[in-house]
Structures are given as C-alpha cells and as structure tokens.
Image (cartoon, helix red, strand yellow):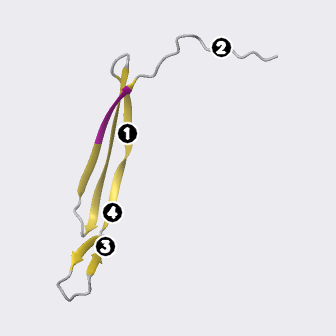
C-alpha cells in the first residue's frame, strides 16, 4: 500500500492499492568444492514485475555465494550392526 497525504482539512491519509503481476525463476543453486576445508554454494533467483499500477516495474535478481566448512569424511569405518 502507498500512502498519499491530503491537504489540511482533508479526511486524513488516503491509501492507494499497489497491484502488479510477476513471473519468477525457481532458485537454482550448485555446490562448489573450493578446497579440502571449505565448500562454496552459488544460488541465483529472479523475478519480473509487469502490468503494474502505482509501483515501478522491472527485474529483480539475487545472486548469492556462500562459503562454509567442508563436509567431514569419517576417519574410521562405521560399525556394523549385528542382530541375533
């Protein structure tokens, strides 16, 4: 909602609807091994607003790159479960 102030003596603040349609791409990501101790993740998502009323139209794009500790591999083999 967008607020528009009226002149003094008016009835207060009048709210206008902001209506738009949008299309989006699904978030797409990929894991990247960067070293033996860290790993990276790259993600992109976007959307476009159109047929807008009382708001700007255009594209919005998010590009995210995250570094985190690499997944540790077990140093010993897991124990087998024995059933009797």
Residue 1 lies in magenta, yes or no? Answer: no
Neighbor class of circle 1 (other Cα within 10 Å; few <14, some 14-19, many 20+) is: few
Q: Which mark is residue 21?
A: 4
The magenta segment is 63-68
76 left or right, relative to 42: right
Q: Quadrant of the C terminus?
A: top right
Which residue is found at the position 65% from the left and 13% from the top?
79
Query: Is the C-beta separation of discs 4 and 2 under 8 Å?
Result: no
Q: Dot 3 corresponds to which residue?
A: 17
51 left or right, relative to 38: left
Magenta stretch, main secondary structure class: strand
Residue 64 lies in magenta, yes or no? Answer: yes
Q: Nearer the viewer, mark 2 or mark 1?
A: 2
Residue toward you, 6 or 19 = 6
Q: Earlier in the sequence, mark 2 or mark 1?
A: 1
Neighbor class of circle 2 (other Cα within 10 Å; few <14, some 14-19, many 20+) is: few
| Residue 28 locus on image (x, y percent) | 37, 39
Looking at this rendering, what residue extends furthest in the right direction?
Answer: 84
Tell me the quarter of the picture where residue 54 sits: bottom left
Q: Dot 1 corresponds to which residue?
A: 28
Q: Earlier in the sequence, mark 1 or mark 3?
A: 3
Secondary structure category for the residue under label 4: strand
């Amino acid at each position: 909602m967008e607020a528009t102030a009226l002149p003094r003596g008016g009835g207060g603040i009048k709210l206008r609807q902001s209506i738009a349609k949008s299309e989006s791409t699904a978030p797409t990501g990929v894991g990247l091994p960067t070293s033996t101790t860290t790993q990276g993740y790259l993600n992109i998502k976007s959307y476009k607003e159109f047929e807008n009323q009382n708001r700007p139209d255009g594209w919005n794009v998010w590009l995210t790159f995250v570094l985190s500790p690499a997944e540790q591999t077990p140093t010993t083999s897991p124990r087998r479960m024995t059933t009797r």
